[in-house]
Amino acid sequence: MKKTKIAFVGVGDISHTYLPNLTKKFDEIEVIGVCDLIRERAEWAVREFGIPKLYNDMYELFADPEVDIVLNITRPDEHYEVTKAALLAGKHVYSEKPLAATLEKGAELVELAKEKGLYLGGAPDTFLGGAIQTARKLIDAGEIGEIVSAAGFMKCRGHETWHPDPEFYYKRGGGPMMDMGPYYVTAFVNLLGSAVRVTSMTRNTYPERVITSKPKYGQVIHPTVPTHVAGLIEFESGAIATLLTSFDIYPMGSNNFIEIYGSKGAMIVPDPNNFGSPVKILRPSGEWEEIEPTFDYTWNARGVGLCDMAKAIETGRTPRAGYELTYHALEVMTALTTAGDLGRHIDIASRYNRTAPMVAGIPEGKLD
C-alpha cells in the first residue's frame, strides 16, 4: 500500500500531540521529515519518533519531491507565509488554525490552491470526533426537532498563567476568537449549516497582562486584539447562535460547551476542543438522556483531519476539513471580531456545504 508522505513545518507545543498520532496511530500516512526555526526541536522529533529527514529550513522541505502534504503548525500570524510558499512549491497543505490571520490573506491562499489544483485545509478537526459526529447524527435525525437557537461558551483567564510562550495569543491572529473560536464556529457550522450574518460586542479588559509562567515570568504583554468577544451568528436555516469567547473572566460552574435548542428538546454538546464525551439530550418530559458517542475517535485524535485529506487526495473526494470549511470559519471569526468596532451586522459572503459525516466501523487509523 502506498502511503501519503507528510512533513512538518514547526515542532512547537502542539506537535507533541501530532507527532505520536501521525507516526503511530494512522496507517495510511508516513511522516518523513521535520523542520523548525529552533533546530533543537526538530532534532528532538527526529530522535524521538524515528523520522528520517531533518530539513535545514522549510524551503528545503518544499523542494523534496517525496513530500505530498506539508503540515503547517507554525504560529497563527505565520500560517499565511508558510502555506503560500508551500502551495507555490506545488505541495498540498494542512494548517493549524486559523487558515490565516486575516480574511484577505485567507482568500489569497484559497485562490492560489484553486489555481494550482492543490488541496488546502486544516484544523480544527475535533468535529470529526465521536462527540460532535454523534450530535450531528442526532440533530439530522430530528431528535430535538427544528433547531431554533444555540449557544457556545469559551471562558478562561488567559494563557499567560500556564503557557511557556504566551505573547502570540494576544497579537494578530490570536485573541480568544481566533485562538479558540475555530473549535466553536467549526462545530456550529457542521451541526447547523452555513452562517449568513453576524454581529458582536468586543473589549480588551486588561491593557497589560503579566506572565506568571516560566520561562518568561514577570514579562508584560500589551494585547493588540480584543480579548473578550460576545457575538451572535445567524445561520441559513434561520437558527441564531450566541458565542462568547473570553480570555478575561474566571469560569464558574459548567464551562466550554455548546447547547443546541430545538423545537422538541435541547442538547448539550461537549467541549468542541475535545473529541469524545457523552452527548446529553433534554426531552420534553424534562428527562435527560446521556448518549455515548456512536462514532470513533473519542481520544485526542488531532491529525485525523490531515489523514482524511490524504484519503481525499487518493480518492478524489472533498476533504472534510478542507478550505471550504476553514475559510468559512475564518470569515465568521474575523467578522465577529470586527463587528463590535463597526457597530453593525456583517453579512457572510462565503457558504459552507457540509461534507459527508464520518463512517462508523472503519478501523481507527484508516479513513473512507
Image: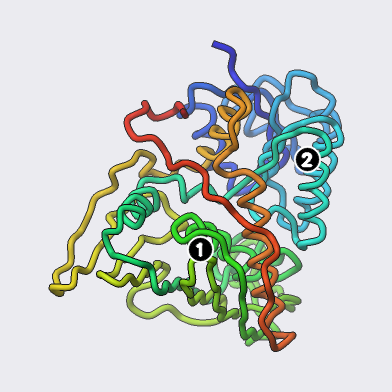
Q: Residue at x 39, y 53 (%)?
A: 132
Q: Quadrant of residue 112?
A: top right
Is 192 placed left or right of 18 in the picture? left
Q: Height in image: 289 above or below 342?
A: above
> Does dot 1 land on a helix, a strand or a loop?
helix
Q: Residue at x 34, y 74 (%)?
A: 254
N-terminal label among 1 and 2: 2
Residue sitting nearer the eye, 291 or 191: 191
Q: Provide residue 320's location: percent of width, then percent of height.
A: 55, 42
Q: Residue furthest top?
A: 1
Kind of residue indicated by mark 2 = Ala
> Does dot 2 land on a helix, a strand or a loop?
helix
Q: Provide residue 286's location: percent of width, then percent of height.
A: 15, 74
Is 158 placed left or right of 140 in the picture? right
Kind of residue indicated by mark 1 = Tyr
Mark seen at residue 113:
2
Mark seen at residue 268:
none
Q: Residue at x 62, y 80 (%)?
A: 199
Around disc 2, counting alpha carbons within 10 Å, would you say few (fewer than 14), some (14 to 19), or many (20 or more)?
A: many
Labelled pair 1, 2 in contact (Cβ < 8 Å): no
Is 117 placed left or right of 146 in the picture? right
Residue sitting nearer the eye, 315 or 173: 315
Mark seen at residue 184:
1
Around disc 1, counting alpha carbons within 10 Å, would you say few (fewer than 14), some (14 to 19), or many (20 or more)?
A: many
Count numbered badges in the picture. Answer: 2
Distance Cα–Cα, label 1 vs label 2 = 25 Å
Q: Provide residue 281's location: percent of width, then percent of height.
A: 24, 64
Q: Provide residue 141's location: percent of width, then percent of height.
A: 30, 53
Q: Height in image: 324 above or below 202?
A: above
Q: Which quadrant holds the N terminus?
A: top right
